[in-house]
């Protein structure tokens, strides 16, 4: 089983930006879910 600290629903402009900034701030386990 895989785990993540943050799950972002939607990989559009806002979701991608949030993921980018979380990783830049030091968050290691970020998952972006897009269908």
Image (cartoon, rainbow, N blue to C red):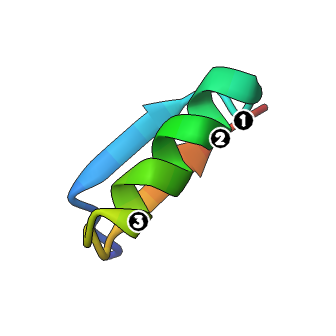
Q: Using the image, tell me which numbered label, if any, was put on residue 24.
A: none
> What residue is at 76 percent from the left and 26 percent from the top?
12
- Disc 1 packing (10 Å; few <14; some 14–19; many ≥20): few
Question: Mark 2 touching mark 3, by CB under 8 A?
Answer: no
Q: CA distance from mark 1 to mark 2?
A: 10 Å
Name the residue tied to disc 2.
Answer: 16
Element type where label 1 sits in the image: loop
Q: Position of residue 22 (x, y in %)?
A: 36, 54
Element type where label 3 sits in the image: helix
In this picture, residue 9 sits left or right of residue 24: right
> What residue is at 72 percent from the left and 35 percent from the top?
34
Q: Nearer the viewer, mark 1 or mark 3?
A: 3
Q: Position of residue 27 (x, y in %)?
A: 26, 67
In this picture, residue 33 sits left or right of residue 1: right
- Closer to the N terminus: mark 2 or mark 3? 2
Name the residue tied to disc 3.
Answer: 23
> What residue is at 28 percent from the left and 63 percent from the top?
25
- Disc 3 packing (10 Å; few <14; some 14–19; many ≥20): few
Q: CA distance from mark 2 to mark 3?
A: 11 Å
Kindly indicate the quadrant of the structure image that contains residue 1.
bottom left
Q: Quadrant of the C terminus?
A: top right
In this picture, residue 6 sits left or right of residue 31: left
> What residue is at 62 percent from the left and 23 percent from the top?
14
Q: Position of residue 17 (x, y in %)?
A: 60, 38
- Closer to the N terminus: mark 1 or mark 2? 2
- Up the image or down, 9 lies above or below 28; here it is above
Name the residue tied to disc 1.
Answer: 34
- Disc 2 packing (10 Å; few <14; some 14–19; many ≥20): some
Closest to the observer, 28 or 34: 28
In this picture, residue 34 sits left or right of residue 3: right
């Amino acid at each position: 089983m895989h785990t993540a600290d943050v799950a972002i629903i939607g990989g559009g402009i806002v979701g991608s930006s949030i993921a980018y900034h979380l990783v830049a701030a030091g968050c290691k386990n970020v998952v972006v879910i897009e269908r």
